Structures are given as structure tokens and as C-alpha cells.
Amino acid sequence: MQQTRGKTIGITLFILLLLTPIYWLLNMSFKTNKEILGGLTLWPQEFTFDNYIVIFTDPSWYNGYINSMMYVSMNVVITLLVALPAAYAFSRYKFLGDKHLFFWLLSNRMAPPAVFLLPFFQLYSSIGLFDTHIAVALAHCLFNVPLAVWILEGFMSGVPREYDEMAYIDGYSFPKFFVKIFLPMIRSGIGVTAFFAFMFSWVELLLARTLTSVDAQPIGAIMTRTIGASGIDWGVLAAAGVLTIIPGLLVIWFVRNHVATGFALGRV
């Protein structure tokens, strides 16, 4: 009984510790700059929606969210389209250098994004992809595809090969078998992969900021440039931070069952 009570207290304190910064960000988003800089208050004394109104009425702000969602969505789709057949090949076939190639894919994921910053910038500037959504999406694929292949290969290896053989005996073509039979069997792995691809692409700032300037600038880059003549607009910055957290929460909500199963059964 005492041990259970201790665990409950520990979990409660841990949750409070995690939620405190989020609550403080939400609290600041409904305050004026004067109140934020005036002193410590646990809740807004002058409750205002002005900070959110600025976000939704100023094109420089809401376009940042649109840009971020566009290249993140493109990245997730491209990552899955590339990683699914690659992971199937690694899980079902043995070929010369397969283990070395698999390790090389993972080694790309281990490198920091700053290593590839200059090559991407020079390449995209030369071929006219600079400041486009597809440029950031493809750059993020360099890090997301290896991780996706590694995760999906673990799930696919857990599916017995007999399913493949039975499908061929029943007259299924490979595309029909892969889409209608195989993919539903690893939907938890696909959910986990999409979750990690989305989260990396959504929070990554260095590549997204360097490879864009105006037309495809993400919300993260805009949030770092809020200093004006009157100083930092803390209220608007806090409101932007709250709105930046919401897409991640929505993704977690929709794939929560797949993620839970994936953590239990897969490589993650």
C-alpha cells in the first residue's frame, strides 16, 4: 500500500513538472506584454485574445503554419512511399552487402543536420529549389527515411513469410498482396513511423530555416524573428507556441493506439 502511494506521488509530481511549462506558455498567451513584464502572476489579470488575433490575421504568422504543415505532410508521404518497399526488401531478401547497406542508412540518421546544411543550401540554390516546400521535405527525408526503414523492417520481419507464399498461391499479384494484405498487418508500424517522421520534421528548425527565406518559411523560423522596435512581443510569441503544440497533440491523438501497439511489438 505504501509502495503504491509512493508511485502515485512520484507520477503526479512528474506530470506536474511536465505540464508546468505548458501551462505557463498558455498563461502568457492570454496576457498583455505589460502584464508579462510587470511581474509574476499565476493567471491573467487582464484576459485578452489579442495575441491570437494577431496570429490569425497577420499573413506573416499564419502562412508560417501553412508552410510548416505543407512540407511536413509532404515529408511524411515521401518517407512512407520510399521506406515501405525498402523495408520489405531488407526483411524478405538476402543480398550482397545488405547488412552494410542497412548500417549505412542508419549512420545517416546519426549525423547532425548541420553537417548537411551547406551541401543542401548550395545544391538547392543551383537547381532553383531554394525557398520551396519540397526542398525542406526532401532534406528531412535524409534523416526520416533511414529511421523509417529501420522501424518498418522490424515489424515486417515479424510477419511470417508463409503469408507471402499463400497470397501468391491464391493468385494475388505482388502490388495487390502488398496493399490489401501485408500493409494492414503492419499498420501499427506504419503509425509509429508516421508519428516519428512527423515529429522530427515538425520540430526541426536548422534546415527548415536555412533552406527557406520568404515563400516557404516555417513557423519556427518566424518565431525566432519576433524582435521589433519595441522589443520582443512575448504575448504573440507565447500564442504562437501554443498553436505550434496543437498539431503534435492531434497527431498523437489519432495514432495513439498504433503508437502504443508499436512500442509494445516493434523495434521502438
Image: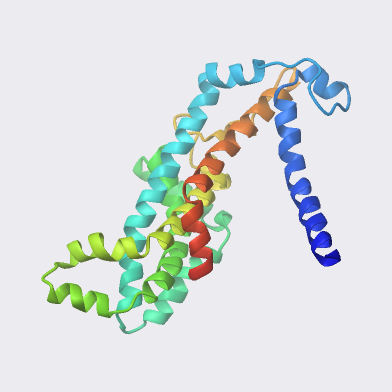
- Count the numbered circles shown: 0
Residue nearest the observer in this picture, 248 or 185: 185
The correct choice, above or below, for 66 with respect to 105 in the image is above
Kindly tell me whether residue 119 is visible in this rendering.
no
Please provide percent x and percent y for residue 17: 78, 48
Q: How is the image coloured?
A: rainbow
Residue nearest the observer in this picture, 122 or 209: 209
Please provide percent x and percent y for residue 155: 41, 70
**Quadrant in which the N terminus is drawn:** bottom right
Kindly tell me whether residue 189 is visible in this rendering.
yes
Left or right: 13 in relation to 55? right
**Residue at the farthest right position:** 39
Left or right: 121 in relation to 50? left
Residue nearest the observer in this picture, 134 or 11: 11
Res. 184 image quadrant: bottom left
**At x 32% / y 70%, what residue is drawn?**
88
The correct choice, above or below, for 3 with respect to 39 in the image is below
The correct choice, above or below, for 97 with respect to 141 in the image is below
**Residue at the farthest left position:** 171
**At x 60% / y 38%, what residue is drawn?**
245
**At x 42% / y 47%, what residue is drawn?**
137
Res. 56 image quadrant: top right
Left or right: 129 in relation to 255? left
Please provide percent x and percent y for residue 214: 48, 29
Please provide percent x and percent y for residue 202: 53, 44
